[in-house]
Amino acid sequence: MKRADLEKIVRTSRHEKVAVLMGGRSAERAISLLSGDAVLRALRERGVNAIGIDVADDLAVQLREQSVDRVFNILHGRGGEDGQLQGMLGMMGIPCTGSGVLASALTMDKARTKQLWSCLGLPVPEGEVLDENSEWDQLIRDYGELVVKPVHEGSSIGMSMVDSAPALRKAWETAREFDSLVMAERRIKGREFTVTLLQGEVLPAIELSTDREFYDYEAKYLAEDTHYICPANLAPAQQERLATLSRAAFDSVGCEGWGRVDLMQDEEGDFYLLEINTVPGMTDHSLVPIAAKAAGLDFGDLVLTILYGSQN
């Protein structure tokens, strides 16, 4: 949306109170608080009547007592990104940013999301869900190096790269500390990309580069030497393929509003889908603001587009 259109919506919506929901109790609480503070400041600077709420068990009571009309959801992880919040707000009749119950619940489950994509013919790394009966040696023989991750966590929490059966079992045990379901998938070696979708538009892709073993929690949020190339340096045909694949992945699971698709490109140039984030980070290290800036949107325009973009 153009800035003039966004400003008009803000003027006509001055009677509304917007709650920025952040924090919560997931493993991504700290990042959610940072994202929420950034979003809240930006909304207030643009004239939105916004309040911040650190989400707790009395959220429904707070929303009623504060007479909240609309929610900007920036709760990362379980409780905010998995359909629970979306269902509650739907029952209360309060509009909320981002995807609805079905898409949120599905994409929070990386294993089932991959199953759906695979059935639709979209490219994903081979793999399976692990348990105590998994054949660790056979998995290494079948796939070589593996990525092990909790099925329902984000921000690379509990994630490991392994190339031996003992390391695989240990990685499974580590990931189980964060989630009862753990998955392993063939490690794709090559270039890593992320693509933001915003109100029906595909924003410029970002290529990620880090000297660490992989793009882990520290590389995402703490390190100062992580490199972000935006727009990504790809040939036009590859750019089109990446955008088309990202849109197909986003639409196939019913996502709405905004989100971010993470992908890898192997050494042969083929792309593979990894996962979707339906409530991406909005910190000073986050990827969506970088893509928006490359598309000509400053941070204020970005948060207003997420909040009000569906009204155009």
Image (tube, rainbow, N blue to C red):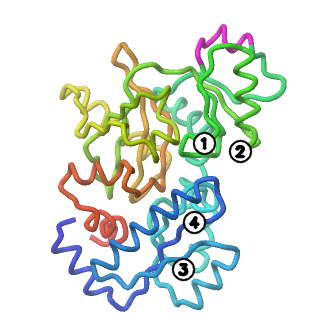
Q: Which residue is mark 1?
A: 157
- Quarter of the picture holding the N terminus: bottom left
Question: In the figure, 34 relative to 114: above or below?
Answer: below
Tell me how far mark 3 sits from mark 4, CA to CA.
22 Å
Tell me how far mark 1 sits from mark 2, CA to CA.
8 Å
Left or right: residue 54 compared with residue 16: right
Tell me how far mark 3 sits from mark 2, CA to CA.
33 Å
Q: Which residue is mark 4?
A: 23
Of residues 120 and 184, the one nearer the viewer is 184
Mark sitting earlier along the chain (3/4): 4
Label 2 with label 4: CB-CB less than 8 Å: no
Span highlighted in magenta in the image: 137-145
Left or right: residue 167 compared with residue 110: right
Query: Looking at the picture, which amino acid does disc 4 mark?
Result: Gly
Q: Which residue is mark 2?
A: 178
- Quarter of the picture holding the C terminus: bottom left
Residue 270, percent across and down?
37, 20
Q: Residues within 10 Å of mark 1 (few under 14, many from 20)?
A: some
In reply to whether residue 143 is colored magenta, the answer given is yes
Query: Looking at the picture, which amino acid does disc 3 mark?
Result: Gly
Of residues 26 and 261, the one nearer the viewer is 26
Label 3 with label 2: CB-CB less than 8 Å: no
Mark number for residue 93? Answer: 3
Q: Residue at left 46%, top 32%?
A: 273
Query: Looking at the picture, which amino acid does disc 2 mark?
Result: Phe
Label 3 with label 4: CB-CB less than 8 Å: no
Residue 89, percent across and down?
57, 74
Label 1 with label 2: CB-CB less than 8 Å: yes
Mark sitting earlier along the chain (3/1): 3
